[in-house]
Image (cartoon, rainbow, N blue to C red):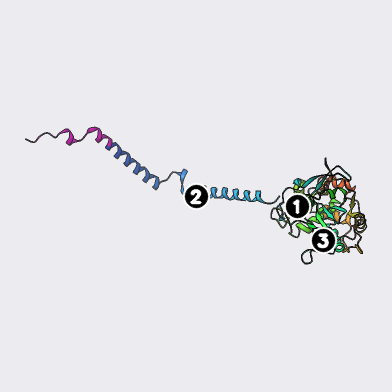
Amino acid sequence: LKEKPTYAELGNPSTIGVWSLLLFMLRCLVASCLTFALDPPASVSLLQLSAHAESSNSDARDAEQEQEKRTELDDEASNRPREVSARTEIHEVKCSSGKEDVMHIPGNMVMLGEHGLWCPNAKIGSTSVYNAIARIMKFSGRGSEVERCYPPELHTKPCWHPRQMRSAYEMIKRGYSSRLCKAFTFTFIRNPWDRLRSAYVDKIQTGKIMIHRRTDMSFAEFVRFVATQDPWEMNIHWRPASVHCNMKGKQPVHYDAIFKLEDGFNQELDSALQRIQLMPDVITIENQQVEPGVRGRMKFYHGARDITYKNELVDLVAKIYADDIKLGGYSFEKYDDFPRGVDDADV
């Protein structure tokens, strides 16, 4: 007779049950995968998967563009060299002799000869002053360019020409600050409506300075942009003179003379040079004929495209340059004649 199979030969019933369960689960999983592949749910269709991928790419592009905007230059949103804040370039100088015990001098001021301390304001006759100084001192820069002292915020080479022209920043840095205390301090100011128009025509329209990488910015857009800027962060070509030369605020420079460009540039420059003991043989600087001031202003400001009302840009300039306007007693309607004797690059 055949013996009855042993328990071991039949296998452990609990082990058989586990394997059966695992096999059943595997079959279900395979069937589910096949069903998903042949008939995917609408919520995860290939079309939606593609749309999701495109949305992710679009978000990435938007983030990249936003980052580019953040890294663009601001006032300055221009193509000028990146600046440190001009706000940090006001230097306290303690004076043992001179007009004041303490002077708060902008680093962009320039020592002319041994007796003059001038604060250059771009678009306010600065090119003409540099040209006159170059004639008197008989020196120039590279090629036909006249040597200039640029603000330290622009990180250019040090301006140091002994007995001729030195930046106030370098004077202070090298231990000659006491000479600044005794110097005759002066600067030039200009009607802000004319100055901002000049900056637009010479820098923005020509593409020399680009704001947000644009080359087609209208005058109205430019004025509105300037109105949004912190004055300290503006490009030096339209930064208010009262800010750039520290003429207002809690600790201003008390200038010996503030000359107005409109009062006859040659005469004012002659007066300044005599006061600092620089006596040129000839200082007259020729200038091409330009459009009379008020007519030019009205054409530019009232005739600008995209303005919301007639005096929109006029009012914005009045707000931006309130201190400059007060310093010079300026108004939009005053000064019918444009100043003569100013170098064409300044106009």
Q: Which mark is residue 345?
A: 3
Q: Nearer the viewer, residue 337 or 341?
A: 341
Give the amino acid at mark 2: Ser
The reply to whether dot 2 and dot 3 touch (C-beta < 8 Å) is no
Q: How far is mark 1 from mark 3, CA to CA?
A: 22 Å
Q: Quadrant of residue 29?
A: top left
Give the amino acid at mark 1: Pro
Please provide percent x and percent y for residue 266.
Answer: 91, 59
Query: Few, some or many C-alpha atoms within 10 Å of disc 1 (few <14, some 14-19, many ≥20)?
Result: many
Q: Secondary structure at mark 2?
A: helix
Q: Nearer the viewer, residue 46 or 297?
A: 297
Q: Secondary structure at mark 3?
A: helix
Q: How far is mark 2 from mark 1, CA to CA?
A: 54 Å
Q: Is 74 covered by the magenta stretch? A: no
Give the amino acid at mark 3: Ala
The residue beneath circle 1 is 152
Magenta residues, start to end = 1-18
The reply to whether dot 2 and dot 1 touch (C-beta < 8 Å) is no
The residue beneath circle 2 is 50
In the image: residue 221, left or right of residue 130: left
Q: Quadrant of residue 237?
A: bottom right
Report the label total. 3
In the image: residue 212, left or right of residue 238: left
Please provide percent x and percent y for residue 263.
Answer: 92, 54
Position of the N terminus by quadrant: top left
Q: Nearer the viewer, mark 1 or mark 3?
A: 1
Please provide percent x and percent y for residue 324.
Answer: 85, 47
- Camera sees residue 133: yes
User: Which comes sooner in the sequence, label 2 or label 3?
Assistant: 2
Query: Few, some or many C-alpha atoms within 10 Å of disc 2 (few <14, some 14-19, many ≥20)?
Result: few
